[in-house]
Image: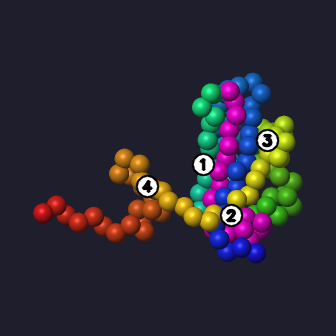
Amino acid sequence: MSERPVRVVVHYRDPRGPTGAVTAAYEQAGRALRGTPGLIGHELLAVEEADGRYALMMAWRDLASYRAWERSLRAAGHPSPLRPYQDRTRPAGHYEVYEVHDAWYEAVGGRASTAAQAAAPEPEPPA
């Protein structure tokens, strides 16, 4: 198995439009994901047209970590509150797994995530 980081993108759709149901389910699922071994982070992306389509991007340390979590989720009967919103109308399926070959992120507005801040050197004091 790959030791490269992976990203998993899961597609969701609320057929009623942007009612807040998907974001509420995401918040609940996010609390349950805290502390999951190998999970680096996750974010919910809303389609700009605000038509009720979303993509969940999960960042995993490696494929083995993701597969272990996936097996445990399957064994538990897929209890995610997001499950009813999976977009199964997509021809390629409701999710995809991507291996990260290269990545670059710049902190937005001088702010970075907690993990990035912890890894970054302290700024030099002004002269």
Q: Residues within 10 Å of mark 1 (few under 14, many from 20)?
A: few
Q: From mark 4 to mark 3, how far is it between C-alphas?
A: 31 Å
- Residue lying at 38% horizontally and 52% vertically, measured from the top left: 111
Q: In the rendered image, which residue does mark 1 sit on?
A: 43
Instruction: Look at discs 1 and 2 and give the one toward the viewer.
Output: 2
Q: Which residue is mark 2?
A: 99
The residue wearing badge 3 is: 86
Marks 3 and 1, Cα distance to the nearest angstrom? 16 Å
Q: Please, what is the three-letter code of the amino acid marked with disc 3? A: Gln
Closer to the camera in the image, 1 or 80: 1
The magenta stretch is 51-68
Q: Residue at x 68, y 27 (%)?
A: 51
Whether residue 123 sits left or right of residue 94 in the image: it is left
What is the C-alpha distance between the residues marked 2 and 3? 22 Å
Q: Is residue 10 magenta?
A: no
Residue 56: in magenta span: yes
Cα–Cα gap, marks 2 and 4: 20 Å
Q: CA distance from mark 4 to mark 1?
A: 16 Å
**Marks 2 and 3, the one that precedes in the sequence:** 3
Give the residue drawn at x 84%, y 37%. Answer: 89
SS type, badge 2: strand
Quadrant of the rendered image containing residue 120: bottom left
**Which type of secondary structure does the marked residue at label 4 adopt?**
loop
Mark-to-mark CA distance, 1 and 2:
17 Å
